[in-house]
Image (cartoon, rainbow, N blue to C red):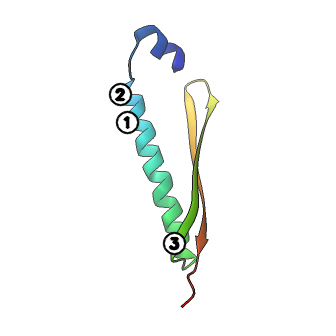
């Protein structure tokens, strides 16, 4: 995709929107998993992206689910 962007210039809006949607889905899944663990919060959230194959990318989100003491 970077090559295409270099040829046409500017932002590839559809690709950007797809990545944002994928990021939002990853965050929703992280929250769902934390809720299943009865966590009160998620700390140390990190995002990574990588190119899986030409034209395909993945977005990963990591965090630590924590239970607060009362």
In the image, residue 30 lies at what x, y percent?
53, 61
Indicate left or right for 54 with 16 as reference. right
Label placed on residue 41: 3
Q: Residue at x 35, y 27 (%)?
A: 13
Label placed on residue 17: 1
**Local secondary structure at mark 1:** helix
In the image, residue 1 lies at what x, y percent?
51, 21
Indicate left or right for 66 with 29 as reference. right
Label 2 sits on residue: 13
In the image, residue 50 lies at what x, y percent?
62, 35
Q: Which residue is drawn at 46% across and 8% down?
A: 7
Q: Is residue 57 above or below residue 29?
A: above
**Local secondary structure at mark 2:** helix
Marks 3/2 in contact by CB < 8 Å: the verdict is no
Q: Which residue is drawn at 48% across and 56% down?
A: 27
Q: Residue at x 53, y 14 (%)?
A: 3
Q: In this view, does 33 lie above or below 58?
A: below
Snapshot quadrant of residue 21: top left
- Answer with mark 3 or mark 2, whichever residue precedes in sequence: 2
- Answer with mark 1 or mark 3, whichever residue precedes in sequence: 1
Q: In this view, does 2 lie above or below 33?
A: above
Indicate left or right for 32 with 54 as reference. left
How far is disc 1 from disc 2 in space, using C-alphas? 6 Å
Other-residue count near label 1 (Cα within 10 Å), few / some / many at <14 / 14–19 / ≥20 = few
Which numbered mark, 1 or 3, is in the foreground of this view? 3
Please name whichever residue, 53 or 48, is drawn nearer the observer in this view of the structure. 48
The residue sitting at the bottom extreme is 70
């Amino acid at each position: 995709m970077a090559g295409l962007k270099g040829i046409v210039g500017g932002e590839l809006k559809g690709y950007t929107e797809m990545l944002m949607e994928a990021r939002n889905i990853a965050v929703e899944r992280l929250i769902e998993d934390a809720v299943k663990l009865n966590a009160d919060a998620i700390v140390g959230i990190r995002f990574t992206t990588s190119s899986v194959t030409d034209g395909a990318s993945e977005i990963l989100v990591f965090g630590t689910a924590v239970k607060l003491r009362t």
